[in-house]
Amino acid sequence: MASTSAPHSHLQKYETRWRDLHDFLKNKGYKLRSRYSPDWVPSWTNTNKVPIKCEDGVKSPHSHLLDAQRTHDGARVSLKCIDVSRHPYEIEIGRYFCNSPLSEDPANHCVPIYDVLEVPTDDNLAILVMPLLRDATDPFFDTVGEVVDCVHQLFEGLRFMHRHHVAHRDCMQLNILMDGSIFIDAWHPSDQYMSDDLKRPARHRTRTQSPPRYYYIDFGISRKYDASNTDPLELPIYGGDKEVPEFKEDYSKPWNPFPTDVWYLGHAIQETFLDRYSGVEFLSGLVSDMMHSDPAQRPNMDEVFSRFQVIRQRFSNWKLRSRVAHDEERSISHLLAHWARRIQYIVRRIPPAHTSSS
């Protein structure tokens, strides 16, 4: 979409598209931050303020994603520009999981799509409206129960997709997000560590106190198959994770994308937990099998979920409350803070996990 006015000197080139969409989105009921208003005057103009410390001085980290406010209820949403000529199935698959009865199934962890906006000036451009989600790995996990809740939801969600004959094909770490239920303050979408006004770190509770819901996003290269097609084959297409062993073995050979999904999720859990935390060794055997170099030797998602349930059923409440320590939180002060929280949870009778083991 061509820019309709001169680029603002403080906007990145890719941001001008959002500035040009400002009035269209406003008419559709979505308000962008002041940075993207056509008549924006930076708040630091004629002051001694440092731009990066001003709310409107922080650029969006993604060219095709931006936050907005839904004007009729004030809800914060995420807008995603997609090229429908390059990703012709993303809207179809996203809507499939948003329709009843699938949308009402608690095992459905596909990001909801609130709206699809067709841009009248560009036939290939559509804008998905979704809830504003955030990095699933921040803040750090604190207990085995918090890890169990997360992994349970991820296994449940991918199993749900596969049972409905959809291969995600890019379920890597960056395509797993969570809602903001643990946050006391609204966070700034372009600097998620900070509050929305950038005046302080965004305050939050723990995952034990306010358990988040985890979601899969980005169905740009996903595919849905007929139920009768029990062994679909697709030529490889790289998502964000470039380490898939079968793709390295033969990139010109068609492969069944469902075992590849299992590898992707196993690798995401490896990167998120096993490579960075102590106390999560109970995941290693299952994740190793999910990442088997031979796709035919990997468990399917029904088997993965069942095996995980057997693992967690062996855990006592004391085990679920036990500490997992990130590489950056190995000090005595972090250990003492964990024990203070653990005692508080016990006294207040806060459950150590919030997903069912059945």
Image (tube, rainbow, N blue to C red):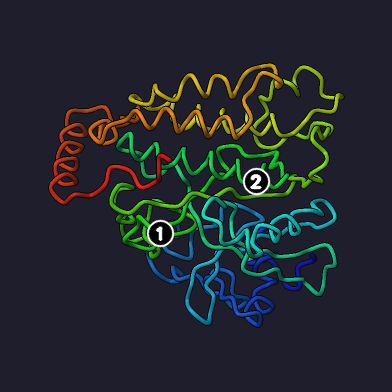
**In the image, what residue occupies the spot 18% across and 49% down?**
349
Q: Position of residue 144 (x, y in %)?
A: 33, 34
Is 352 or 234 nearer to us in this picture?
A: 352
Give the number of the mark in front: 1 or 2.
2
Q: Is residue 10 visible?
A: no
Secondary element under disc 2, as helix, strand or loop, is helix
The image quarter containing residue 236 is: top right
Disc 1 marks which residue?
187
Quarter holding the N terminus is: bottom right
Q: Are marks 1 and 2 in contact (CB under 8 Å)?
A: no
State which quadrant residue 253 falls in. Answer: top right
Q: In this rendering, is residue 104 above or below 159?
A: below
Instruction: Give coordinates of residue 312: x percent, y percent.
Output: 39, 32
Q: Which residue is painted at 65% across and 60% down in the image?
A: 80
Q: Tag 1: Cα neighbours inside 10 Å, few (<14), some, or many (≥20)?
A: many
Q: Is residue 307 visible?
A: yes
Identify residue type, mark 2. Met
Q: How many marks?
A: 2
Horizontal side, residue 36 vs residue 119: left or right: left
Amino acid under disc 1: Trp
Residue 113: x %, y % from top left: 63, 63
Give the vertical position of 26 relative to 282 (above or below): below
Residue labelled with disc 2: 161
Q: CA distance from mark 1 to mark 2?
A: 30 Å
Q: Residue at x 77, y 30 (%)?
A: 256
Q: Nearer the viewer, residue 148 or 127?
A: 148
The residue under the point 19% across, 40% down is 342
Residue closest to the eye, 119 or 345: 345
Q: Quadrant of residue 335?
A: top left
Q: Nearer the viewer, residue 210 or 37?
A: 210
Q: Which of the two labelled residues, at mark 1 and mark 2, occupies the earlier sequence position?
A: 2
Quadrant occupied by the C terminus = top left
